Amino acid sequence: MADQNDFATEAALIIASAASFDPEKHGQFAMVPEGYTIADLEGYQNWPNRTRANHRFVDIASLVAYLTIFGKPATMICADYGNRVIEAVIDGDLPDAPSHRQHRAAFHARFSDKLRAWLEVEKKALSQVEFGLFLEDRAVDVIKPDSADVMEMVMKFDATKKVAYKSSTRLHDGQRQFQYVEENETRGAVTLPDHFVILAPVFQGMEPQSIKFMVRYRIEDTSLRFIVQMHDKDAVLREAFDRCVDAVRFGWASEGHPIFVTG
C-alpha cells in the first residue's frame, strides 16, 4: 500500500504540472488541497535545490583539489588537532547571509603504512628474535644507522640468540654494550644503538620526514628484551599535522580564507 505522503506528492505534482511547475527551476513546492499540506517537488526537478555532500578524503591533495573546484568566498575551514581532521564547509555562512551548511568535505589524517609498521610494535617488549625479524623487514625505512649496520645487527641477533646476557654498560656515545655468556662459557659482548632514525611520511600522502625511535633494552632471566618508542611523539604528530594545515592554506586557503583551529 502506497504511503500517504507519496499520494500527497503525486497529487502535488499533478497540480503543479497543470499550473506552473518547471523542472528547470529550483525550490518549487505545491499545496495539496486535502489538509492543505505542502509537498516538496525537488525530486522532480532536473537538479536539486542545493548541493548536499559530506566527502571524506585521506589525502590532503584531494581536499585541496576539491576546494579548488567547489570552494566559495563563504567556505569555512576548521582544523581539529585533537582528531587530526581538517573540515571545510563549502556553503558556509557570511556575516549577513546564513547558510544551510550541507556541503562539506574533510581530510582525515591517516598514518602512512611505513610509520604504522613501527607504531604497531611501539612499547611492546620484543624478544631478540622478534626484534631481529622486525628490523630485517623494516631496514629499508632506517637511515641511521645505515642499512648495512642494521643488517649486521640482525645477523648478530641470530648468532647470539641462545646466549645468556649478564649485564649492560652505557657507552660515551649513547650506545649500550651487553655482556653475555655462551653455553660453553665463552664470554662476549654486543654493542647496540640507543635509537633508530627512519625516513617516512607521518600521514598518508605527505612528504617523508626524519622520525626518531628510541630503543630501550632490558635483561629478563638472561634474555634481552627490546622496547621501541617514538621520540617526542606529541610534538612530531602535531608538526606533521601542521604540515597538512599548511598544505591547505597555501594550496587554496591563501586567497583570503582563514583556517580556524579547533580541538
Image (tube, rainbow, N blue to C red):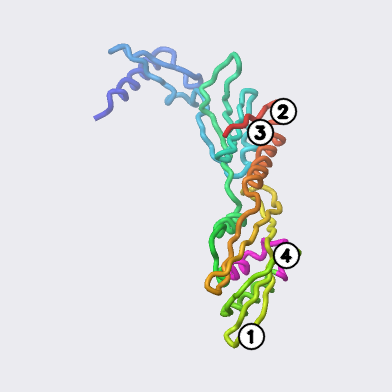
Q: Identify the amino acid type marked 2.
A: Glu
The magenta region covers 131-149
Which SS class for mark 4?
loop
- Quadrant into which the C terminus falls: top right
For the stretch drawn in magenta, the main secondary structure is helix
Residue shown at 54% from the left, 20% from the top: 99
Instruction: Tell me the number on the disc at residue 186.
Output: 1
Q: How many marks?
A: 4
The residue mark sitting in front, 3 or 4, is 4
Q: Few, some or many C-alpha atoms within 10 Å of disc 2 (few <14, some 14-19, many ≥20)?
A: few
Residues at circles 2 and 4 in contact by the CB criterion of under 8 Å:
no
Q: Identify the amino acid type marked 4.
A: Pro
Q: Is residue 69 left or right of residue 37?
A: right
Q: Which residue is mark 2?
A: 255
Q: CA distance from mark 4 to mark 1?
A: 28 Å
Q: CA distance from mark 3 to mark 4?
A: 42 Å
Q: Identify the amino acid type marked 3.
A: Thr
Return the disc, 2 or 4, that comes first in the chain's sequence: 4
Q: Which residue is mark 3?
A: 68
Return the disc, 3 or 2, that comes first in the chain's sequence: 3
